[in-house]
């Protein structure tokens, strides 16, 4: 295989991996911080995709303009969902394990609710629109402009989130909560404010991922579920609560899948993803990049 | 212990309530059934959620709804001279075989509907056809593509689409007649994909066309670029994708992305959908080949159907393949009921023994197979999906060199 062919293959894996990372980050924020294993994460991605599609086809808006709108809308939705469900759960649960189990059930319910709501509102048809599909030459090979844009923005959002967590006081509070919930509360970090906000940010990121995906792929109400599964694999790879690990894990999974599909067969893709998942669980249960 | 004692009581109480509620729910239905001129109850399960939905909600359920509406607007279904309203009894099968089987079991076993309409897709039809046989319900399936299902020789099952050997045979004939020397094949690894892949290989064996690549992929694939890049390097004359709607669009978008533009670009299910033109755009779709067998130019009745469909669903067009066959199936069923009434065995005999005039032309069954409709190839030309092969049913002339993707 030529160097160009390798470059093409790895680049196409990274592009897919960028989306995986973005979806994974949102989920990891919710799980790592609050122990909410949000099985409905992919459904909010689907909502983001549909909102973008509606704006693009009905109002003729640029999908790019929808990025901030989708983020804000889903952040708002996240606050509402948290207030209606997880806030009460957290108050009632005797300990965090019980909360996690109950939260999982609630998330399952949300999954069905959101998916069926979307089916009811938009029907089950495949949807899509044409946006920036012209090929762009990159180092002797070519990629669709929308894919490069998707990759760039996925990376940008991921890095922005990591910078937010690392360099701001808000981020410091969130990291403190991830490391020691009790300790953080003792030094005056307000979980009642931070938890809903971070849940909202997680949903917002999921919506952004959906918005990006709708530029390059067709969408249906059932599109979210596979991304939830991928996000679970990604955060297992990267380590719960580790944002850098999630980014690296997402990109890595994308590349592994691309290489695997090229050298074996796309039919074996799930085998590859789950193989990696099981291997990591067996040998590095805390994630590939954890220091423990 | 208290709980133990209360359980049987509670269970009995619940059973009693259920029985009362159940009989209350069924009594009106029973009365309606016995009264002459009551509605004709026609049951089906359809994918409204889950991965089968995009196909089911384009090629199948809209036609059922449009048909029932048209029949009722005309005063009802003609049952041997008596007009009776049509009542559709339907539910969501959630794209799940288990749910689908249970739904039909209920429809035929306990609801005892007058007739059934088939579910969507080869897999679901494979599961339901033997059941319909057992209950003695004729089943005119518009979206079942499987030689194995035909070979089961179920006397109540009729398949309206052209079977894999016909579709793939027509495609290979067309390629050979237009000088294609090499092909690359990508196929979906389910019943539909595997059978078409086998039929395609059989047809190719009879020609001198070289196969440079054969790769399978799973349902819900998100990226075919790594495979397409490999194929592009081998530069075949033709690309054949045995694909479902999302992958048809994915393969097309990614072929454009990497600049893979063979003379013949063929993708299977979904090419004939309006969605394809919406997503790929009309100039982008120009020259793309796929599974299609009719359009509004095929016959005046096809045009009437096309217009009625587009009007009812606010601009949503029927697809140029299975939708037409689905409508033909409803036409056949309607004519059979008018002729022989609701005796299901008599309907079955009528369907099996008659040459039917439909919007897609004559339909005649040999066993379960529609042997009157030839295998066909469609092609996007100027924003319309035209039938280009064979000449006997063509609505336009084949463009044998696909222009570059736009």
Image (cartoon, coloured by chain):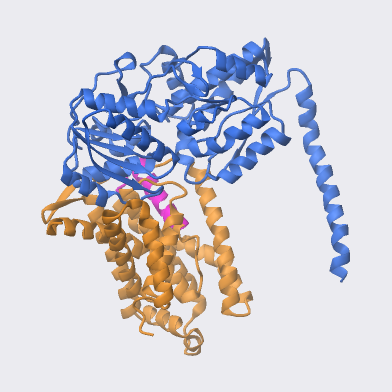
Q: Nearer the viewer, residue B148 or B61?
A: B148
Task: Using the image, determine if residue B278 lies above or below residue A108.
Answer: above
Q: Quadrant of residue B135?
A: top right
Does the magenta-highlighted stretch encompass residue A53? Answer: yes
Q: Nearer the viewer, residue B289 or A201?
A: B289
Image x and y of residue A101, in percent: 58, 71
Image x and y of residue B236, in percent: 18, 38
Image x and y of residue A42, in percent: 45, 58
Task: Using the image, determine if residue A273 lies above or below residue A236.
Answer: above
In the rendered image, is residue A205 in sight? no
The residue drawn where x is 60% and y is 34% is B130
Total marks placed: 0
Q: Which corner quadrant holds the C terminus of chain A?
A: bottom left
Q: Quadrant of residue A18?
A: bottom left
Determine whether, in the image, residue B263 is placed left or right of residue B222.
left
Does the magenta-highlighted stretch encompass residue B206? Answer: no
Q: Which corner quadrant holds the N terminus of chain A?
A: bottom left
Chain B rendered in what hue? blue
Determine whether, in the image, residue A25 is placed left or right of residue B400.
right
Q: Nearer the viewer, residue B292 or B406?
A: B292
> What secondary structure is the stretch in magenta mostly built from?
helix
Chain A rendered in what hue? orange
In the rendered image, is residue A48 in sight? yes
Direction front: furthest residue? B206
Q: Please give the range of residues in magenta.
A: A43-62
The residue drawn where x is 55% and y is 58% is A110
The residue drawn where x is 59% and y is 41% is B100
Image x and y of residue A270, in percent: 40, 57
């Amino acid at each position: 295989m030529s160097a160009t062919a390798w470059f093409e293959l790895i680049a196409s894996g990274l592009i897919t991996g960028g989306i995986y990372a973005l979806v994974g980050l949102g989920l990891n924020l919710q799980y790592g911080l609050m122990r909410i294993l949000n099985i409905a994460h992919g459904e909010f991605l689907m909502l983001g995709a549909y909102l973008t599609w509606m704006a693009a086809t009905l109002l003729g808006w640029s999908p790019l303009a929808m990025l901030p709108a989708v983020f804000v809308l889903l952040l708002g939705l996240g606050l509402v969902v948290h207030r209606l469900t997880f806030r009460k759960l957290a108050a009632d649960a005797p300990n965090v394990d019980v909360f996690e189990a109950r939260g999982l059930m609630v998330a399952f319910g949300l999954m069905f609710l959101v998916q069926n709501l979307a089916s009811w509102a938009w029907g089950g048809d495949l949807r899509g629109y044409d946006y920036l599909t012209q090929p762009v030459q990159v180092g002797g090979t070519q990629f669709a402009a929308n894919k490069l844009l998707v990759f760039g923005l996925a990376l940008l959002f991921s890095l922005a989130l990591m910078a937010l967590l690392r360099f701001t006081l808000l981020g410091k509070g969130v990291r403190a909560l991830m490391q020691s919930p009790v300790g953080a509360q003792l030094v005056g970090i307000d979980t009642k404010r931070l938890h809903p906000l971070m849940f909202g940010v997680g949903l917002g990121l999921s919506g952004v991922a959906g918005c990006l995906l709708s530029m390059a792929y067709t969408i249906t109400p059932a599109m979210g579920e596979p991304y939830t599964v991928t996000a679970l694999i990604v955060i297992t790879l990267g380590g719960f609560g580790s944002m850098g690990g999630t980014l690296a894990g997402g990109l890595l999974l994308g590349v592994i899948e691309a290489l695997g599909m090229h050298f074996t067969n796309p039919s074996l893709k799930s085998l590859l993803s789950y193989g990696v998942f099981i291997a990591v669980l067996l040998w590095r249960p805390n994630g590939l990049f954890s220091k423990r | 212990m208290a709980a133990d004692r209360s359980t049987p009581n509670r269970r009995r109480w619940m059973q009693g309530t259920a029985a009362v509620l159940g009989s209350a729910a069924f009594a009106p239905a029973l009365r309606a059934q016995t009264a002459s001129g009551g509605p004709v109850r026609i049951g089906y399960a359809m994918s409204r959620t889950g991965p089968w939905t995009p196909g089911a909600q384009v090629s199948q359920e809209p036609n059922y709804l449009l048909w029932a509406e048209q029949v009722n607007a005309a005063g009802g279904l003609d049952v041997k001279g008596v007009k009776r309203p049509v009542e559709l009894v339907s539910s969501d099968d959630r794209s799940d075989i288990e749910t689908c089987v249970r739904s039909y079991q209920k429809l035929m076993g306990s609801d005892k509907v007058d007739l059934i309409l088939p579910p969507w897709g080869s897999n679901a039809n494979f599961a339901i056809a033997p059941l319909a046989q057992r209950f003695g319900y004729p089943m005119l399936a518009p979206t079942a593509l499987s030689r194995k299902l035909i070979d089961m020789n179920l006397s109540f099952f009729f398949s309206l689409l052209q079977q894999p050997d016909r579709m793939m045979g027509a495609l290979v004939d067309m390629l050979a007649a237009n000088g294609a020397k090499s092909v690359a094949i990508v196929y979906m690894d389910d019943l539909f994909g595997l059978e078409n892949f086998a039929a395609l290989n059989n047809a190719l064996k009879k020609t001198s066309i070289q196969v440079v690549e054969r790769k399978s992929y799973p349902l819900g694939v998100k990226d075919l670029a790594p495979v397409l890049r490999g194929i592009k390097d081998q530069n075949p004359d033709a690309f054949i994708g045995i694909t479902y709607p999302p992958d048809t669009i994915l393969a097309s978008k990614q072929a454009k992305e990497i600049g893979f533009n063979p003379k013949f670009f063929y993708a299977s299910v979904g090419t004939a959908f309006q969605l394809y033109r919406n997503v790929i755009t009309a100039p982008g779709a120009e020259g793309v080949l796929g599974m299609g067998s009719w359009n509004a130019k095929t016959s005046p009745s096809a045009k009437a159907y096309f217009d009625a469909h587009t009007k009812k669903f606010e601009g949503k067009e029927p697809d140029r393949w299975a939708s037409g066959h689905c409508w033909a199936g409803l036409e056949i069923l309607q004519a059979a009921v008018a002729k022989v009434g609701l005796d299901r065995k008599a309907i079955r005999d009528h369907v099996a023994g008659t040459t039917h005039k439909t919007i897609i032309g004559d339909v005649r069954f040999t066993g379960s197979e529609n042997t009157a409709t030839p295998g066909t190839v469609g092609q996007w030309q100027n924003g319309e999906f035209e039938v280009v092969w064979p000449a006997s049913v063509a609505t336009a002339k084949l463009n044998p060199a696909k222009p570059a993707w736009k």
